[in-house]
Image (spheres, rainbow, N blue to C red):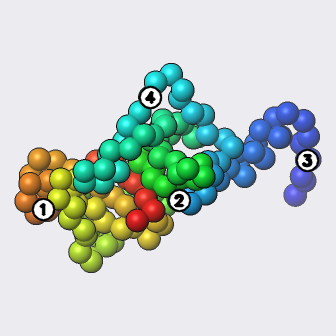
């Protein structure tokens, strides 16, 4: 087998892509994110909790992020259909599909929705009028977002 060492700008870009870090709670934003400064954002980070946020893109996926005073991530959410968790879940995955891997109970948060803590740190959120009002889940409900937060 023969290997070729590639140097130059293209190799540097490839190396940066492989070194790209995921957006993590309690950490500064990774250097490869592109922040949208064209408008101001507010994000619902829980029931009755509206906070200033920034919209950004990382590796083609759109996120909304809340930063602490120390400029560390305290909340991150995505509704982007391109996002996929390490265990294969994405926006639109059904409650029935999620339950095949996660058999435990999720968490109902009145006024916000119903979510499951996933093994990789993300929470899979199910939000619709019925979930918000009564907290009952049905097999046909679908994931509407993924989020992480510091509480």
Mark 1 or mark 2: whose residue is earlier in sequence: 2
Image quarter of the C terminus: bottom left
Query: At numbered mark 2, what does the secondary structure look like: helix, strand or loop?
Result: loop
Q: Are marks 4 and 3 in contact (CB under 8 Å)?
A: no
Q: Is residue 39 above or below residue 118?
A: above
Q: Residues within 10 Å of mark 2 (few under 14, many from 20)?
A: many
Measuring from the top left, give residue 87's x and y in whole percent.
44, 63
**Residue drawn where x is 17% and y is 59% of the image:** 110
Cα–Cα gap, marks 2 and 3: 38 Å
Q: Are marks 1 and 2 in contact (CB under 8 Å)?
A: no
Cα–Cα gap, marks 4 and 3: 47 Å
What is the count of numbered marks?
4
Measuring from the top left, give residue 19's x and y in whole percent.
72, 52
Image quarter of the N terminus: bottom right
The disc at residue 135 is 1
Q: Nearer the viewer, mark 2 or mark 3?
A: 2
The disc at residue 40 is 4
**Residue drawn where x is 31% and y is 66% of the image:** 116
Q: Residues within 10 Å of mark 3 (few under 14, many from 20)?
A: few
Cα–Cα gap, marks 1 and 2: 27 Å
Q: Is residue 119 above or below residue 67?
A: below
Q: Nearer the viewer, mark 1 or mark 2?
A: 2
**Residue drawn where x is 44% and y is 71% of the image:** 119
Q: Residues within 10 Å of mark 1 (few under 14, many from 20)?
A: some
The residue lying furthest to the bottom in this view is 104
The disc at residue 4 is 3
- Say which quarter of the image contains residue 101: bottom left
Q: Nearer the viewer, mark 4 or mark 1?
A: 4
Which residue matches tag 2? 25
Measuring from the top left, give residue 62's x and y in whole percent.
47, 38
Cα–Cα gap, marks 4 and 2: 21 Å
């Amino acid at each position: 087998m023969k290997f070729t060492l590639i140097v130059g700008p293209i190799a540097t870009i490839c190396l940066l892509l492989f070194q790209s870090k995921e957006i993590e709670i309690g950490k500064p934003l990774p250097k490869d994110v592109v922040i949208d400064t064209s408008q101001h954002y507010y994000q619902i980070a829980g029931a009755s909790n509206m906070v200033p946020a920034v919209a950004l893109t990382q590796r083609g996926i759109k996120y909304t992020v809340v930063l602490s005073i120390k400029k560390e991530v305290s909340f991150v959410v995505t509704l982007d259909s391109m996002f996929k968790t390490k265990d294969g879940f994405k926006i639109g995955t059904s409650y029935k599909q999620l339950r095949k891997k996660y058999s435990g109970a999720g968490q109902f948060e009145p006024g916000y929705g119903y979510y499951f803590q996933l093994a990789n740190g993300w929470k899979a959120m199910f939000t619709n009028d019925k979930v918000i009002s009564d907290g009952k889940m049905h097999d046909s409900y679908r994931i509407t977002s993924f989020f992480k937060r510091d509480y």
